[in-house]
Image: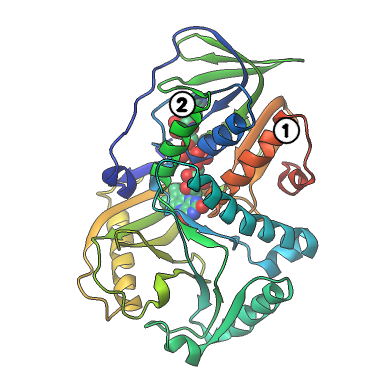
Amino acid sequence: MKLVTGDMLWTNLTKIPHQYPYLSEDIVCDVVIVGGGITGALAAYYLTQAGIQTVLVDKNIIGYGSTRASTSIIQYEIDTDLVGLSAMVGEDDAVTCFKLCEKAVYDLQEVVNTLDDDCDFALQDCLYYTHNPSETKKIQKEYNKRKEHGFDVSFLDKNSASDKFSFPIEAGIYSTTGAARVDPYRLTQALISYSVQHGLKVYENTEVDKITPQDSNVYLETANSFNISANHVVIAAGYESLPYFQQKIADMYRTFTIVTEPIKTFDGWHKKCIIRDNEDPYTYLRTTGDNRIIIGGEDELIGSWSSKMSNLSQEDAASTSKYQRLEEKLIRYFPNIEGIKTAFKFSGLFGITHDGLPYIGEAAHMPRCYFSLGYGSNGILYAVLGGQLIKELCLDNHPKELSLFRFDR
Ligand SMILES: Cc1cc2nc3c(=O)[nH]c(=O)nc-3n(C[C@H](O)[C@H](O)[C@H](O)COP(=O)(O)OP(=O)(O)OC[C@H]3O[C@@H](n4cnc5c(N)ncnc54)[C@H](O)[C@@H]3O)c2cc1C
């Protein structure tokens, strides 16, 4: 499974700061985390903070899976909007999910504050909008629902939006809390390094081949034939966790991203807020601390693992046309911004669940194994929630929120 393709922004900006050894002996620990992306790193942070003896293994190197392709937009909004999610899971649960994501933004801010690196974290405003007149009522309804439940939102109509943005907006929801940006690679590295200082043991180039749950323990076998015996396993292997399930738990897409060189001024972009439209597939935009623009979207369902879209190369005409469309869109969004020049182009595989919510917790067929699968565009906030909830499971607590993210929902 080649998760990412192209020239990734984050790992170009930051070279590998630290290398970890591979496992070369049998070990025993309380919890072993499989996967050293942002999800495993956050789980490691919460577990070591709770004083739990934790080991993390990655078959490759830290942060070089999907994490390094992430656009890393952090926002309380879920792919499925509040009205849509209410229809699927009931209004109370839908509101709880939105509120959990909102809280997770500030929890992440607190986590970053404890690290040696600011990870380019910054709180941001965010805009969810439509340019389609026939969608205005839908956005208004979504706004009303969010307002009713206490989210800090204002409604933008065509006129009020034109003062703030240079692209056509028929209706929009502007949120002044619950969103942020971060550099996901620096965050992953900083979390691991912090956790190592607090007792975490890390092994790179250590692939887990087999997981065998037993009554009181779980045994893991690595590709180099070393054994790990643990009380619990946290499976944070991203989209490579899919083979642990016989049934389909996510639809896989390829999503495309371009990143510009740093820009001098942002005419027509109110407060450089995070932007997402309500098209299918949607387009999303954010900026970085060094004033680059990131624009992503153009998602395509990959079909089977052997399909062309699964294995698409950068040179393929389908990739070229996707990047070109993003470049053209960017100019249409911001005709007044001068000097837009593409610096990086990449694409990545991306899983979405039927309701846009993650899977977190134990799967019936693998006792003592806790999955943290933040599938959907809120993967990073879901990783925060996964870390928090799995820490509780490892402490033998059973938070009620876990039922929102169970496998058999
Ligand atoms: C292009 C793109 C844009 C995105 N944009 C956003 C966004 O704006 N906001 C957001 O919140 N989320 C976004 N996401 C989703 C988010 O990036 C992912 O949810 C997140 O990066 C997944 O992190 P992870 O740690 O679970 O997986 P990964 O980063 O893939 O890490 C999993 C790790 O597990 C290791 N591994 C796998 N199998 C084994 C094994 N058998 N043994 C040992 N190690 C193993 C891998 O080597 C890998 O390092 C985006 C994703 C993509 C691809």
Kind of element beneath mark 2: loop
Q: Mark 1, residues whose alpha carbon is within 10 Å: few (<14), some, or many (≥20)?
A: some
Query: Above or below — where is 248 with respect to 333?
Result: above
Which residue appears at 45% of the width and 53% of the height?
72
Q: Is residue 326 left or right of residue 408?
A: left
Kind of element beneath mark 1: helix
Residue 33, horizontal then vertical, whole percent: 56, 27
Q: Earlier in the sequence, mark 1 or mark 2?
A: 2
Q: Nearer the viewer, residue 157 or 291?
A: 291
Residue 117 appears anywhere in the view: yes
Residue 245, horizontal then vertical, whole percent: 64, 33
Q: Mark 2, residues whose alpha carbon is within 10 Å: few (<14), some, or many (≥20)?
A: many
Q: Where the N terminus falls, by quadrant?
A: top left
Which residue appears at 77% of the width and 29% of the height?
396
Residue 165, quarter of the rendered image? bottom left
Q: Is residue 228 left or right of residue 285?
A: right
Query: Above or below — where is 67 with respect to 199?
Result: below
Q: Nearer the viewer, residue 243 or 265?
A: 265
Which residue appears at 65% of the width and 53% of the height?
354
Query: Above or below — where is 396 with respect to 359?
Result: above
Residue 239 appears anywhere in the view: no
Numbered label attached to residue 393: 1
Q: Does the beta carbon at disc 2 come under 8 Å from ligand 1? A: yes
Q: Is residue 196 left or right of residue 383?
A: left
Q: Nearer the viewer, residue 213 or 159?
A: 159
Q: Nearer the viewer, residue 236 or 197?
A: 197
Amino acid tagged 2: Asp
Residue 187, horizontal then vertical, whole percent: 43, 43
Query: Above or below — where is 89 with respect to 136?
Result: above
What residue does disc 2 label? 58
- Do labels 1 and 2 touch, CB within 8 Å? no
Q: Most extreme residue toward the bottom, as rendered?
A: 159
